[in-house]
Amino acid sequence: MQTKIHQLQSILSGAQRIVFFGGAGVSTESGIPDFRSVDGLYHQKYDVPPETILSHTYFVHHTEEFYRFYRDKMLCLEARPNAAHRKLAKLEQAGRLAAVVTQNIDGLHQMAGSRTVYELHGSVHRNYCLGCGREFDAAWMLHSEGVPHCPDCGGLIKPDVVLYEEGLPEREVQGAVDAIRRADVLLVGGTSLNVYPAAGFLRYFRGKHLIILNRDATPADDMAELCIRDNIGEVLGQIDVTDVNR
């Protein structure tokens, strides 16, 4: 393992434009459950599968049940950035990390200090009234009851998260694609690479070094120069940013 850590350090130290592409595994070390691992949400027992609850159709037709699940499982507001979030923020501050492209909706990258973050699936920290457009933060949503309605116009409030059956936000997609195309190192971490269209973003990479940091095998392992199967926070926590910031 240490040999691989040294190899990772060497690649990052020589990089000019690193882009990080991450998923739920980045935040599990902060106490936020993922979806597809053995102990993830998809393997827990619910009357309705989580992927159905988190669909646009279910939101429209079973709005109260949607919000019951959303408040219970998706609003993890006590979570704090872990070693992976913090190290990525330091890499950006050192001038080596150009962008974070994330499938997560928890806002932990920004909390850690990252500034260029493309949120492919939106964020729980942004919620808006479908009637008048007024915005509400996550704390307001957490403490609301039943189906949340706007106190100004009475309109339904919807989280700014991408549900199943909904398209990805065009602005975030374009930013992510541009960043990945221009990267010389693509660091992929904490994602199964089984969720499309997000997983397909790897095809835009034309750089030198594809690195995958994930606890389990992924469909892209054969394409990667380096694969490290361990907790991403433990791996990135060993990276020396002073050596990267040449």
Image (tube, grey):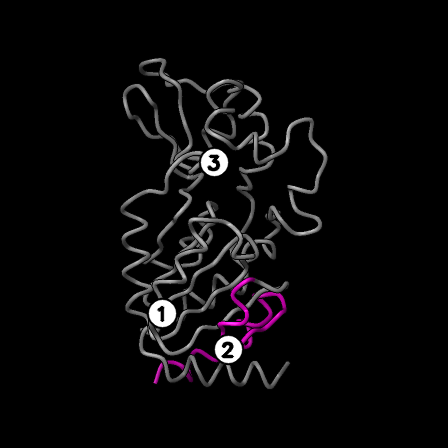
Which of the two discs, 3 and 2, labels the residue nearer the N terminus? 3
Who's the residue at 37% across and 67% down the image?
19
Who's the residue at 27% across and 52% down the image?
174
Q: Quadrant of residue 5?
A: bottom right
| Identity, as a three-letter code, of the amino acid under mark 2 | Ile
Range of residues picked out in magenta = 219-246
Q: Which residue is mark 2?
A: 239
Verify whether residue 95 appears in magenta: no
Q: Which residue is mark 3?
A: 164
Residue 15 vs 169, above or below: the answer is: below
Residue 74 vs 117, above or below: the answer is: above
| Identity, as a three-letter code, of the amino acid under mark 3 | Tyr
Q: Which SS class for mark 1? A: strand
Left or right placement of residue 49 versus residue 169 in this view: right
Q: Position of residue 57 (x, y in %)?
A: 48, 25
| Identity, as a three-letter code, of the amino acid under mark 1 | Leu
Residue 100 vs 16, above or below: the answer is: above
Which mark's residue is nearer the viewer, 3 or 1? 3
Q: Nearer the viewer, residue 96 or 93?
A: 96
The mark tally for this picture is 3
Who's the residue at 51% across and 65% down the image?
220
Q: Position of residue 107 (x, y in %)?
A: 44, 48
Q: Which quarter of the rendering shows the N terminus? A: bottom right
Q: Nearer the viewer, residue 104 or 223?
A: 223
Q: Which quarter of the rendering shows the C terminus? A: bottom left
Q: Which SS class for mark 2? A: loop
Q: Which residue is mark 1?
A: 97
